[in-house]
Amino acid sequence: MKKLMLLTIGMLLTVVYSSAQTGYQLAETIDFFKSYKMQTGDWSIELTESDIQGSPYLNDEFIKGTIYTTSKIQFQDIPLRYNIYNHNLEFQTPENKVLAMAAPEVVEKAIFGEFTMTYIPYISSKKIRRSFFNVIEEGKVCLYSQPEVVYQEPTKAGAYKDPEPARFNRRPDSYFIRIGLEAAVRVGNKKELIALFPEFQEEIATFVKKNKIKANKEEDLQKLVQYYNSL
């Protein structure tokens, strides 16, 4: 049986560009694989594919995409896949090895298929952490979604219950608002949502009420952020 493995790489950039450079230097796809040292490691919980139902991935199949680094280097045609459960951006090498980025902070953004992922700071339990988020709207204020999946342990058969295999259960996405370069903040209820915007509180409150904005609906949050960025 094929094991699911968590594979990591140590990021080792071989070219340094001036910090004054504003554009991206296009690099060959093969340079991406040559630029990083590859290492392997195991999952903390080792499971086999046949043991688990559901999927831990945002996209099950690898999609060729583009990676933009903080060093202003652009790599094209990289097969990418996002592991929701481990919060890892994975890529596939020409030898069909699956690797995850051990130093994701060098990724400014990754675009593959309909997804644009970025690695940014966010607030969780009053602490600043970093993770990948899916970009929904950009501007003075940015809106991000964070897909969520949970692992459910297998259960044994009971007196009136059949056994259930382990599975990954997809949960509704969480949404985050980011003001400028500050850490992103998770969207809570409607009152907390309005409080997240630093200016035009009256206008925002009126817009939310008039348009019946829901704090857990992506389309509504996108409309609100677009409105704020237009003020």
Image: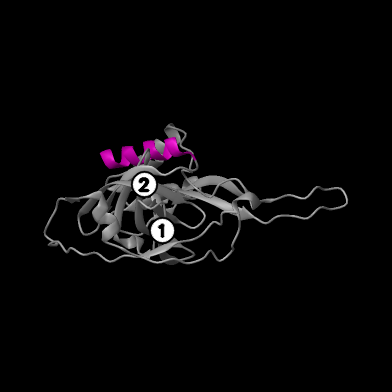
- For the view shown, which residue lies furthest in the right direction? 159
Tag shown at residue 209:
none
Q: Quadrant of residue 204?
A: top left
Number of residues whose C-alpha sits closer than 10 Å to that of mark 2, classed few (under 14), some (14–19) or many (20 or more): some
Going 29% across and 61% down the picture, which residue do you hit?
106
Residue 218 falls within the magenta-colored stretch: yes
Q: Tell me if 165 is positioned left or right of 63 in this view.
A: right
Secondary structure mostly seen in magenta is: helix
Q: Label 1 vs label 2: CA separation?
A: 12 Å
Residue 75 image offset from top left, x and y in percent: 25, 50
Magenta residues span 217-230
Work out whether residue 160 or residue 195 is closer to the camera in this orientation and state it. 160
Instruction: Tell me the residue that label 1 is attached to.
Output: 100
Going 60% across and 55% down the picture, which residue do you hit?
48
Going 56% across and 57% down the picture, which residue do you hit?
3
Q: Quadrant of residue 7?
A: bottom left
Q: Is residue 196 visible?
A: no
Q: Tell me if 9 is positioned left or right of 215 in this view.
A: left
- For the view shown, which residue lies furthest in the top direction? 211
Number of residues whose C-alpha sits closer than 10 Å to that of mark 1, classed few (under 14), some (14–19) or many (20 or more): many
Q: Are marks 1 and 2 in contact (CB under 8 Å)?
A: no
Q: Secondary structure at mark 2?
A: strand
Residue 41 image offset from top left, x and y in percent: 47, 67
Tag shown at residue 79:
2
